[in-house]
Amino acid sequence: MAKPDLFGLAENDNPDGTISTPPAGAHPADPQLQPERETQLERIPGAGSRARLLLEKAASLARGVRRPLPPAWAARQGGAQGNNPGIPGSRQMVVSDITSSQSRQHASATDVTPAHCLAVAVTPGGDSDPSIYQTPNVRMFIESVPGEAEQPTPELVEVEVGSTALLRCPLDSSSNLSHVDWFVIHKEKQTLIFRVRQGQGQSEPGQYHDRLSLQGPGASLVLTQVIPHDDRVFLCQSKRPRAQEHRIQLRVYKAPEEPTIHISTNGISVNNHELEEIATCVGRNGYPFPQVIWYKNRRPLKEEKNRIHIQSSQIVESSGLYTLKSILKAQLAKEDKDAQFYCELNYRLPSGNHMKESREVTVPVFYPAEKLWLEVEPVGMLKEGDRVEIRCLSDGNPAPHFTINKKNPRTGEMEEQETPDNGILVLEPAQKQHSGVYQCQGLDLEDITSLSSDTEKLLVNYVSDVRVSPAAPEGQEGGSLTLTCEAESNQALAFQWLREKTGQVLEEGPTLQLLSLKREAGGGYRCVASVPSVPGLNHTQLVNVAIFGPPWMAFKERKMWVKEDTMQNLSCEASGYPRPSISWNVNGTASEQEQDPQRVLSTVNVLVTPELLETSVQCTASNSLGRNITTIFLNQVGLTTLTPDSSTPAGPSTSTVSPHARANSTSTERKLPEQESKGVVIVAVIVCILVLAVLGAVLYFLYKKGKLPCGRSGKQEITMPASRKSECVVEVKSDNLPEEMGLLQGSIGDKRAPGDQGEKYIDLKH
């Protein structure tokens, strides 16, 4: 047998012992020769990293050579059907040019083990053999070349961006570590980045110049401030005494930022049969690309034809980090109006797998209304005066255009009500005429469909037309009166009579009887008509009862302290029916105020003159039934004047009413302060305080001098006769001290010792 070539084929492997050659001028890529030429090289596990070199050698040797499949390889084809005339079950082979840019790109990115021998067979389809590189129409059998060792798997080192990576160079101890070179491999190109000579390291110019340093006595390196571009293969190589190398695959990771999610501001219509953008998820500054998973109501979403589509794109930042943008498109239904969407980023770090979630969002979903209804607030029994809102609601989004109609009780037709807000009718305050039948209508502007709600009956409870008869009751003292109250309502009524001045309940029921009338019985009475079944619903009516009689005044006489040459307000109040009028006997500015239909208050402003102090001031109240007079005496204020007004409090002006009126709550006492009298009281109080202060000082001085022996103990006891034991002798100090002291001593019967200037105390013990 002839010597096999690179592919293990001998020239006499063909049954006829010949070598097939293409026609003159034919190119190996001629479609007639390669009707099923490979289109894309896919990676299959089990290949080595030197595939590109072997493929190029194979292609260069086999250009234009057409040979049948060797028997040894035809058996590996696994029963593939073919038409090789020399090998049953096989087809004619062609070694094609696979050094195109696309093929080289895929070949260089693989991890094929070194020293392989290749053959390319044209087959109808792919194969699941793990030792095969295949395309839709081409597959390659990879055979190890005897005598060559496989390339060891690179050591894996994982670090995060910004951290420090240790690149170890564990060569055999027999190697000369004083002569080591470090390379970085990128796209099958080796670039020298560091040299180790005699234990000294030197970094080559470039991106690693300032970040590589020698670690320890060996040849290991420390790479600081790791960046995404460092995700490459590093090669430690020594050529003395023999060639050795160690490869390190540096994997760089960086966690992305918290994902942000933005919903579609336009909303999603359920009537749109195309996929619409639901939300966009963005994960920034991660490495490598994170994986995004979309969730709806905590359930992951997957691609679904014509229902869900997830479109993701990646952006490489200038820093080498990746930004992921994922757009969720879907068709939504009405049931998704409250659905919660969020996205999840899955990424890896040296510590393991991690994930980050965005916030949950709700997407506005638009769907037509199917039902309308009315809602009334407040809920429950309504009454006049309430603020009532009638709302028109629907189950559509957005809400249709609403109109609220009310049934006309006379014509029976629905009449549109004015609603400033769409679908909201406000009745404030509600009245009985607002009662009736209401209905809501809605117009969907998208599909121009009209809907109507069920009718709703609104009832506003009321109490109206409260009246009292007689309307103006009058009576004589000693007589009687009967008051009757009536009202209208749509509910059962309850009546109550109150005294206007005091609020006292006089009677339960529509009728009030006033017997044995007195002057004090005159005044206001209030009838309250209420609906017990509707809390807070009531109306009242006030009526004034007049009792005929002459004017009545609280005081016949009264005193008032004034100051000469000052302006003073004088007041006078009277009651009676008919209501009296008041006149004054002095010149001044007078005014009257009607307190009620039977009372009047008059005030006059006068100048206090000496003549006015000598005389008195009179106010006269009169009506058709008589007259009455009150006399006011003006007293001038002095420093020694301490006597207050005996009838009224001191003050510049006073208005006084009958104490009987106060007792019967038909009138109210009104008192105006007299400022001049207040000044007198203040002066008197100050004088009293000064006198008490002086007296207290004198007593304290006498006490300290021992001139007040009463109550002192622990002093010398003076012997006294039994009959005088109960007497208390007090020493009084004055200018005539010798005479007084003599009298005092004589009365006691004791004499002082010569030269004794001390104090003597009397024992008050019995």
Image (tube, grey):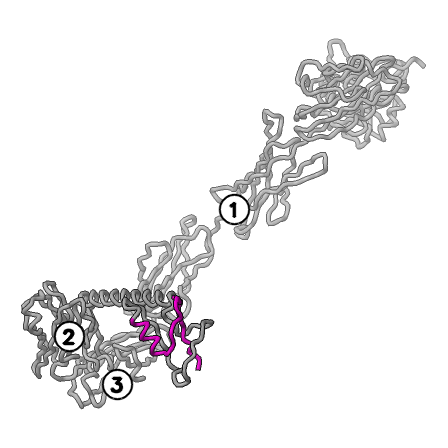
**In what element is the residue under mark 3?**
strand
Between 677 and 49, the one nearer to me in the picture: 677
Residue 475 lies left or right of residue 104; in this view the side is left
**In what element is the residue under mark 2?**
strand
Task: Name the residue that disc number 3 marks.
Answer: 512
Q: Residues within 10 Å of mark 2 (few under 14, many from 20)?
A: some
Q: Residues within 10 Å of mark 1 (few under 14, many from 20)?
A: many
* Label 1 – label 3 distance at C-alpha: 69 Å
Nearer-N-terminus badge (1/3)? 1
Between 161 and 336, the one nearer to me in the picture: 161
Task: Name the residue that disc number 1 marks.
Answer: 363
Q: Which residue is outermost to the top?
A: 24
- The image quadrant that residue 673 belongs to is bottom left
Query: Which label sits in the foreground, 2 or 1?
Result: 2
Task: Name the residue that disc number 2 marks.
Answer: 559
* Label 2 – label 3 distance at C-alpha: 42 Å
Nearer-N-terminus badge (2/3)? 3
List x then y, in percent, for residue 159: 71, 30
Q: Is residue 31 magenta?
A: no
Q: Which residues are magenta?
A: 739-766
**In what element is the residue under mark 1?**
loop
